[in-house]
Image: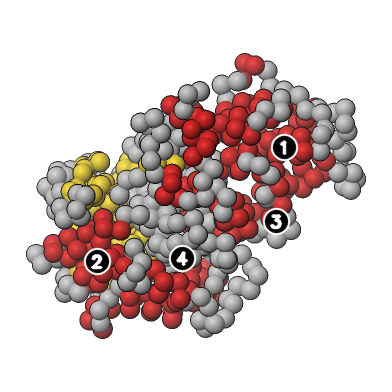
Amino acid sequence: MPEKLLAIHDKIDALYVVSDLHLGQSRNGTLFNQYKELATLAKELANQSADRAIALCLNGDIVDFLLGSDAKYVNTKTAIATLDRIADGESPFSVVFEGLRAFTAKPRALLLLNLGNHDLELAQPQVRAHFVSLITGGAKARDRVRWSTTGFSVEVQDEKVGVVHGNAADPWNKLDPEVVTAVANSAVDDEPLGATTPNGGTQLVIDVLNKIKERYAFIDLLKPETDAVPPVLFALPGGAEIAKPLIGKAAGAFGVSIRNRLKKLIGILSTDDPRTRSLRRDDSVASVVRDRDLSKDDIRAAVDIALEQQLAVESMLPQGNATLGWFDYFVARSNNHSPKDALRAALREYASGQAFAFDELSSDDESIDRRESKDFTVLIAGHTHLARFAPRVQQRGHYINTGTWIRLIRITERLLSDGTFPKLYERLQTSKVAELDAEIDGVPVIYQENSVAFVGPKQSHGAHGTVALLSFSVDAKGSKAAWTVRNSNLSARS
């Protein structure tokens, strides 16, 4: 049963939703770099509010408290200092806070803030109050801010709209209500969860990904991080060892999955567990696979560990299955090919599962859609970082995922080609996010789209309908804004 969404009863003429801004900075740089664009969006909507009631929703993962090698599962003690550092006048993010203050200064503006899974600290009252103080200019402006830990329901232009972040439908990143309540009821100097992790996804970020990102910045830009990232991690030097910190302390569905897989692999490679036989030097990984129900990730890790221990490894599958990217990985690793070849095979698998076509729902989007009420004629989500606009699964209406405004790695066959991949491989060695921005041989490495969900009057921003997925941009000087319609319908029920 999904948690109840906060009902907004204010009259709203137009609703705009953006998600997954991930404001914050680490030694690698910033994931978010659309400073003037977001500031201009807020100011543009502030100007529109002179004629009509405008609501702007920042739909989860507004601030990223998980960035940096010193980040913790949840850290309310340093959260206020983190917010001050982001909003400081010398910070590139300062213009964003300026834009939000301009928006909340308008009498007919309404700012909706929803909790994500990277900004759990905002559930703590003092931290949240401080954040609100940074984006408003006084008591009247603060009254124009609404806050929710679950999402919003609102009626706009005869559409019943639900807005959720989306992580509640993701077993890796779901925040149990008890976790949110513990943070909300804590003092700012408390450790509300102690050593307990909020979920497996947070533990993956803190215990594994943040350590890898110190050396390879591109890891932070791979989405989705559930099925696609582990193969790439395994292909990096030492990748077979990265998940070991999760043994025995993993939590949530993701943690259980990782823990069980590692137990299997440890059983394969050790004589300590009497329930499994060890992998002998004359055994092949293929024979082990036939004896056990292992996933391709299990097999991949077994290949890595077997190679590290100089155990026998042979080709995993017949050549007829060589069209699968993960088969290429096994071939590269089992033949002791270079890390470059192994990473190329892993990135090929990653690319095969990364869907940028926004007119069909992914399985993650379907899970989000099925979880929420059928009563919504428009359901708006984020979390996956990949934009979508498509019919709802079980009912009439439309589902919109607003994706993210941060950079994403987009691996194409041109980048994996013989002529271009060596250059990509060298580029991926950087520890600085900004150094990934430039094209290689005229091929973009970074994909970025400033997506905005819109529900409002017809004929707005070039959209014919009342429901649309838009893109927002500004010119090089930051003085002229432009809207692009990615998809729109005359009605979400048409």
Q: Mark number for residue 304?
A: 1
Instruction: Please give the residue where the numbered disc 3 appears in the rendered image.
Output: 245
Callout 4 amino acid: Asp
Residue 61 in view here? no
Instruction: Please give the residue where the numbered disc 4 appears in the rendered image.
Output: 119
Judge depth for marks 4 and 3 and give the one in front: 3
Give the Cα separation between the discs numbered 3 and 1. 17 Å
* Crowd class of label 1 (few under 14; some 14 to 19; many from 20; radius 10 Å): many
Residue at (28%, 65%) from the top-left corner? Answer: 95
Q: Is residue 46 above or below residue 375?
A: below
Tell me if 81 is positioned left or right of 448 in this view: right
Give the Cα separation between the discs numbered 4 and 3. 23 Å
Q: Compare residues 454 and 83 and report the one nearer the observer.
A: 83
Residue 188 in view here? yes
The quadrant of the rendering that contains the C terminus is top left
Callout 1 amino acid: Asp
